[in-house]
Every structure is written in structure tokens, then in C-alpha cells.
Image (cartoon, grey):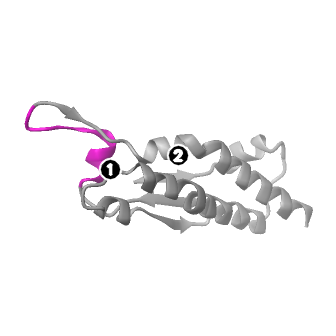
Amino acid sequence: MIRITWDKGKFDKIIGKQRELSREAIGVVGQSLFEGVRDIIEPTTKQLAPVRTGALRDSIHTEKMDKTTTKLADNVHYGIFQELGFYHSSGKFIQHPFMIPAVESHLDDLVNKVENDLKKEIKK
């Protein structure tokens, strides 16, 4: 599971705004974050997931936890071992990362989406 939470203070600096965000803007950022993870990062995570039966890939999902937190997770017990690695009975270390590379490859896209959605809200 990867939990993505935006820090309001840091995000204010990223977009150059030094004022406090309104409740509506916080909601916009949270929704934009959720949509970005769901629409941009989740598909890549599924593409990168190792497939034997398809259960891991099919269990990957995005969930909105609260106004500022979005969770990208899988629902199989072995997903964490594929991501971070494990030692096979042969003694070989096996690792098939899929979540971290997906997030890293699309982080700029996600930040741009959230920034653009927030700018649209501020212009209203």
C-alpha cells in the first residue's frame, strides 16, 4: 500500500500561494489527488504488477481515505513481498516492484494535475 498525502504548507509554496486555502480548495486538491492517482498512477501500477494468476493486478485499487489522503493499495497478502522483495527457497532474492516505480514515473504528472485543478478553483 502506498499512502499519498499532500502537506498543505508545502503545497502552498509549490504553487507560490502564501494564503490559507479555503475549505473548497482543500476539497478540490483532495479530489484532484484522488482522480490523479486513480486515472494516472493506478493504470501504470497494474501494467507493472507481476502476473501469474492476475489476482495481484486485479486487486490494485485507489481509495479516498479523507479530504487530503488517497490510498493506492492491493488486496493480496503477497503484494508487499513482490514490491519490496523476498528470498526464495533457492536462496535467490526476488523483487518485482510495481507501485513505487509507477508513482515515481508519474509524480510530476500528478503534481501538475493537482496544481492546474487548484488554479482553476482559485480563478472562480
The three-letter amino acid code for the residue at tag 1 is: Pro
Quadrant containing the C terminus is bottom right
Q: Which residue is mark 1?
A: 50
Q: Does the stretch in magenta take in 82?
A: yes
Real-space Cα separation, disc 2 to disc 1, in angstroms: 16 Å
Asked whether, in this view, residue 41 is left or right of residue 47, the answer is right
Asked whether, in this view, residue 53 is left or right of residue 25, the answer is left
| Residue 68 visible in the current orientation | no
Q: Nearer the viewer, residue 48 or 64?
A: 48
The three-letter amino acid code for the residue at tag 2 is: Val
Callout count? 2
Q: Residue 10 falls in which quadrant of the image?
A: top right
Q: Nearer the viewer, residue 54 or 30?
A: 54
Q: Residue 23 falls in which quadrant of the image?
A: bottom right
- Mark 2 is surrounded, within 10 Å at the Cα level, by few (under 14), some (14 to 19) or many (20 or more) other residues, namely many
Q: Residue furthest right?
A: 123
Image position, residue 93 (x, y; %): 21, 32
Q: Nearer the viewer, residue 26 or 123?
A: 123
Image position, residue 47 (x, y; %): 44, 53
Q: Which residue is mark 2?
A: 103
Q: Which badge, 2 or 1, comes first in the chain's sequence?
A: 1
For marks 2 and 1, give the one nearer the viewer: 1
Q: Is residue 19 above or below residue 74?
A: above
Q: Which residues are magenta?
A: 78-90
Which labelled disc corresponds to residue 39?
A: none
| Residue 70 visible in the current orientation | yes
Q: Does the stretch in magenta take in 38?
A: no
Q: Residue 30 falls in which quadrant of the image?
A: bottom right
